[in-house]
């Protein structure tokens, strides 16, 4: 019980006022943000590895008629990445959703979506990190979210859909690229 109280006290300290640019007062919060950013860079590379493994002729592959195509699955989670992090309202321009659907525009947009999230993560302040008022708007029930919830939702959503497209690779007869567990060296 004492450990839980100590942990909650440390996490609760993340809601303190923002430190001047640079080091945050709450080192735990800054480390959590920095670790998420390092893992996000690994996620970007793995997503590109999965995308690049699919032969062009299978970008329209659907395991069943009701599912999204390979191209649509990746476009969906790339777009969601942007939408999750637009909720911070920072003066960083999000990438535009491409007008045309092609493997190259999808790849460019996927890169831009991961880069946008990384740029937002690098720019958030300690005050941004402690926010509890982030609203996804019309994509879900009216519920306000914390910054950490946005981080986790984006990470899990990308992993969920990328995991689906790994199955698409198998259905196309392609061995998926190996997943990297560590974010060490990704900073």
Image (spheres, rainbow, N blue to C red):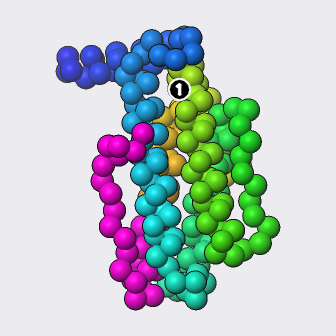
- Residue of label 1: 129
Report x, y in % for residue 80: 61, 54
Seen in the image, is 91 located left or right of residue 10?
Answer: right
Position of residue 144 relative to residue 11, above or below, is below
Magenta residue check for 48: no
Overall secondary structure of the magenta section: loop
Give the position of the C terminus as an image quadrant.
Answer: top left
Tell me if I can see residue 135 in this picture. Answer: no
Position of residue 21 relative to residue 31, above or below, is above
Report x, y in % for residue 97: 74, 59
Residue 84 vs residue 96, the one in the foreground = 96
Report x, y in % for residue 130: 52, 23
Task: Spot the residue most to the front.
Answer: 185
Tell me if I can see residue 185 in this picture. Answer: yes
Seen in the image, is 69 located left or right of residue 181?
Answer: right
Q: How many marks?
A: 1
Q: Please, what secondary structure does the residue beneath circle 1 have? A: helix
Q: Give the extent of the magenta segment.
A: 162-187
Residue 161 vs residue 91, the one in the foreground = 91
Position of residue 148 relative to residue 185, above or below, is above
State the residue at coordinates (53%, 26%): 129
Give the position of the N terminus as an image quadrant.
Answer: top left
Magenta residue check for 179: yes
Report x, y in % for residue 146: 53, 32
State the residue at coordinates (57%, 16%): 21
The crowd level at tag 1 (other Cα within 10 Å; few <14, some 14-19, many 20+) is: many
Seen in the image, is 95 located left or right of residue 156?
Answer: right
Position of residue 10 relative to residue 148, above or below, is above
State the residue at coordinates (56%, 11%): 20
């Amino acid at each position: 019980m004492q450990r839980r109280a100590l942990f909650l006290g440390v996490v609760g300290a993340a809601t303190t006022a923002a430190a001047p640019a640079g080091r945050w007062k709450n080192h735990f919060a800054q480390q959590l943000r920095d670790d998420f950013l390092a893992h996000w860079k690994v996620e970007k590379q793995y997503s590109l590895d999965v995308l690049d493994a699919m032969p062009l002729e299978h970008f329209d592959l659907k395991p069943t008629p009701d599912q999204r195509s390979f191209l649509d699955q990746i476009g969906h989670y790339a777009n969601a990445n942007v939408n999750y992090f637009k909720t911070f309202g920072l003066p960083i321009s999000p990438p535009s959703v491409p007008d045309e659907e092609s493997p190259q525009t999808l790849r460019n947009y996927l890169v831009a979506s991961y880069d946008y999230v990384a740029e937002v993560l690098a720019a958030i302040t300690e005050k941004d990190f402690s926010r509890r008022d982030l609203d996804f708007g019309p994509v879900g029930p009216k519920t306000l979210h914390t910054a950490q919830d946005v981080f986790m939702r984006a990470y899990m959503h990308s992993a969920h859909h990328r995991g689906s497209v790994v199955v698409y690779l198998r259905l196309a007869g392609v061995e998926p690229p190996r997943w990297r567990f560590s974010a060490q060296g990704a900073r």
